[in-house]
C-alpha cells in the first residue's frame, strides 16, 4: 500500500493534504498539468546537477581567481566607435616594433607544413638556446609561454598543504599556480618595492617547496643586483627550488649572471621568454634553464607538442636576429627615459624601471585607466596586485609615448 501511495504521489497531481490518498472527490486527471510538472521536475533536476558539479571539482578551484587580461583592441574600438588603428595599447609590455622580420619570414614558411605535428621535443630550438647560453640541450625545457613552465613546477613539486614564498607585488601567476595545487602562498614585504630577501629566508618552513622571484619584477620594474642574488641563493636550503623569472632580462644593460648557479648544480630554475623583446607574445614560447636532473623531472609533466611548429620556427629565427633586439632595446631605453622624465615634471611618484614599462602612482588607478581608455589609450590598472593607486605603462614608440603623456596630463588636470 505504501509503495502504491508513493507511486501515485509521483505520477498524479498533489493535494495540500500530506497524507493524500486517491478518492472520488479528487479533481479529474489533467494531462497538461502533469506534463508541466514533469517539465519543471526535469529542469530542476538538470539545474541541480549543473550547479552541484562544484561538489565534485577540486575544492581549491572555487576560490581561484582568474588571470584577467585586457580587452582586445578591436573590442575596445567597437565600444568607442573608433578605428582599431587609433587605439594605443600600452598595457601588456609588448614589443612596439613587432616581431623580427626574420621571424615573420620563418613563420610564413612554416605555415606550409601546418598539417604536420610539431617537433615534440623542440630539438632545434632547444639546441640553439643551449648553444647561445653555453649549456647542453638537456638543460632546457620549452613551455607554451614561460607561464607553462611555472605550471610544470606546480605539477612536479607542489601538493596540498605545501608552501611557496614570493615577495608582495610579484607576478600574480605564482600565487595562482600555488592555489591551483592547494599550496599556501607566503608573501614577504618590500621596501620601496624592493623585496626583503632576509625576510624571505626567515619565512621558509619545512613545507616550503618553491621560492619565486621575478627579476626585474613585474609590475614594479625593480631589479635585484648580482651581489644580493648571489648571497641569497647561497643561503637557500638545497632541497628548495628557487625560480628566477627573467622575462625582461634582455632589456638590462648589466644583467646579473644567474646562470652560474645552474652551472654550480643548485636547484635553481631560470625562466625566460620570447614574448617580450623578441615580440612573439602571440606565439607563446618560453623556456626554463636548470640542471639536467631537474629538467628531466619537469619534462615528465609536459604534454607532447606543447609548443606549436610555427612558434618554434619563429622563435628559432628570432633568436638569431641580434639587430632586431638591439633596435628594440634602443627604442625602449629612449622611451622609458622620456616617460620617467615626464613623470618627474608632473611630480608623480614612480619606480625607476629595469623593464620595458614604468610603474607610476596616479592616485586612483582604476579611474585614470577608464579615463585614458575613453581617450583611446590602454594602460594597466593594478588593483589586482593590491596597488589601486598605481598603473603600469608599457614603453611604446616615441609617438605613442608622447600621446600617452598628453592624455595622462589631461585626465589628471
Image (spheres, rainbow, N blue to C red):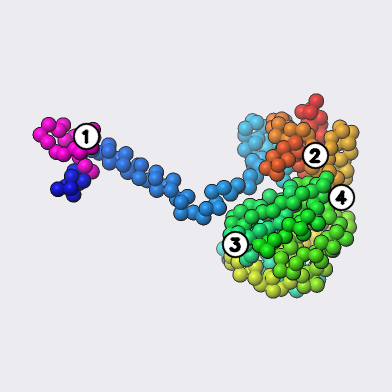
The residue lying toward the viewer, choosing from 250 and 168, is 168
Label 4 – label 1 distance at C-alpha: 84 Å
Residue at which label 1 appears: 17
Label 2 – label 4 distance at C-alpha: 22 Å
What residue is at 64 percent from the left and 55 percent from the top?
184
Q: Which of marks 3 and 1 is nearer the N terminus?
A: 1
Whether label 4 touches label 3, CB < 8 Å? no
Q: Which of marks 4 and 1 is nearer the N terminus?
A: 1
Whether label 2 touches label 4, CB < 8 Å? no
Q: In this view, does 51 lie to the left or right of 365?
A: left
Residue at which label 2 appears: 360
Q: Earlier in the sequence, mark 4 or mark 3?
A: 3
Whether label 1 touches label 2, CB < 8 Å? no
Residue at which label 4 appears: 330
Q: Residue 159 carries which label?
A: 3
Question: Tag 4, which secondary structure?
Answer: helix
Nearest to viewer (mark 3 / mark 1): 1
Q: Is residue 19 magenta?
A: yes
Mark 4 surroundings within 10 Å by alpha-carbon count, few (fewer than 14), some (14 through 19), many (20 or more): few
Nearest to viewer (mark 1 / mark 2): 1
Q: Check the picture and name the quadrant holding the C terminus.
A: top right
Q: Earlier in the sequence, mark 3 or mark 2?
A: 3
Amino acid at each position: 500500500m505504501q509503495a502504491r501511495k508513493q507511486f501515485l504521489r509521483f505520477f498524479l497531481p498533489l493535494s495540500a493534504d500530506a497524507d493524500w490518498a486517491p478518492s472520488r472527490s479528487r479533481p479529474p486527471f489533467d494531462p497538461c498539468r502533469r506534463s508541466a510538472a514533469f517539465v519543471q521536475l526535469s529542469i530542476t533536476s538538470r539545474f541541480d546537477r549543473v550547479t552541484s558539479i562544484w561538489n565534485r571539482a577540486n575544492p581549491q578551484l572555487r576560490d581561484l581567481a582568474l588571470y584577467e587580461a585586457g580587452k582586445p583592441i578591436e573590442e575596445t574600438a567597437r565600444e568607442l566607435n573608433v578605428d582599431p588603428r587609433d587605439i594605443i595599447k600600452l598595457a601588456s609590455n609588448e614589443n612596439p616594433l613587432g616581431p623580427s622580420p626574420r621571424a615573420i619570414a620563418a613563420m610564413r614558411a612554416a605555415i606550409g607544413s601546418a598539417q604536420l605535428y610539431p617537433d615534440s621535443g623542440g630539438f632545434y630550438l632547444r639546441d640553439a638556446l643551449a648553444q647561445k647560453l653555453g649549456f647542453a640541450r638537456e638543460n632546457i625545457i620549452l613551455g607554451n609561454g614561460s607561464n607553462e613552465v611555472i605550471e610544470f613546477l606546480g605539477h612536479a613539486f607542489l601538493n596540498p598543504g605545501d608552501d611557496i614564498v614570493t615577495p608582495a607585488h610579484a607576478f600574480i601567476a605564482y600565487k595562482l599556480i600555488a592555489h591551483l595545487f592547494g599550496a599556501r602562498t607566503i608573501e614577504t614585504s618590500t621596501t620601496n618595492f624592493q623585496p626583503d630577501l632576509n625576510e624571505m629566508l626567515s619565512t621558509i618552513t619545512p613545507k616550503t617547496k618553491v621560492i619565486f622571484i621575478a627579476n626585474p619584477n613585474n609590475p614594479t620594474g625593480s631589479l635585484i643586483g648580482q651581489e644580493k642574488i648571489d648571497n641569497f641563493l647561497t643561503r637557500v636550503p638545497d632541497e628548495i627550488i628557487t625560480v628566477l623569472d627573467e622575462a625582461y632580462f634582455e632589456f638590462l644593460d648589466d644583467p646579473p649572471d644567474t646562470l652560474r648557479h645552474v652551472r654550480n648544480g643548485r636547484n635553481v630554475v631560470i625562466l625566460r621568454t620570447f614574448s617580450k623583446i623578441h615580440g612573439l607574445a602571440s606565439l607563446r614560447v618560453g623556456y626554463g634553464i636548470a640542471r639536467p636532473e631537474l629538467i628531466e623531472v619537469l619534462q615528465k609533466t609536459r604534454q607532447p607538442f606543447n609548443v606549436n611548429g610555427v612558434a618554434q620556427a619563429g622563435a628559432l629565427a628570432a633568436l638569431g636576429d641580434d639587430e632586431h633586439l638591439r633596435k628594440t632595446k634602443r627604442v625602449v631605453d629612449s622611451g622609458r627615459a622620456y616617460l620617467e622624465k615626464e613623470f618627474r615634471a608632473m611630480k608623480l611618484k614612480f619606480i625607476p624601471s629595469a623593464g620595458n614599462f614604468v610603474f607610476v602612482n596616479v592616485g586612483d588607478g582604476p579611474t585614470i585607466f577608464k579615463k585614458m581608455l575613453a581617450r583611446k589609450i590602454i594602460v594597466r590598472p593594478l588593483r589586482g596586485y593590491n596597488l589601486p593607486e598605481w598603473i603600469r605603462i608599457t614603453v611604446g614608440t616615441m609617438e605613442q609615448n608622447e600621446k600617452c603623456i598628453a592624455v595622462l596630463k589631461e585626465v589628471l588636470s
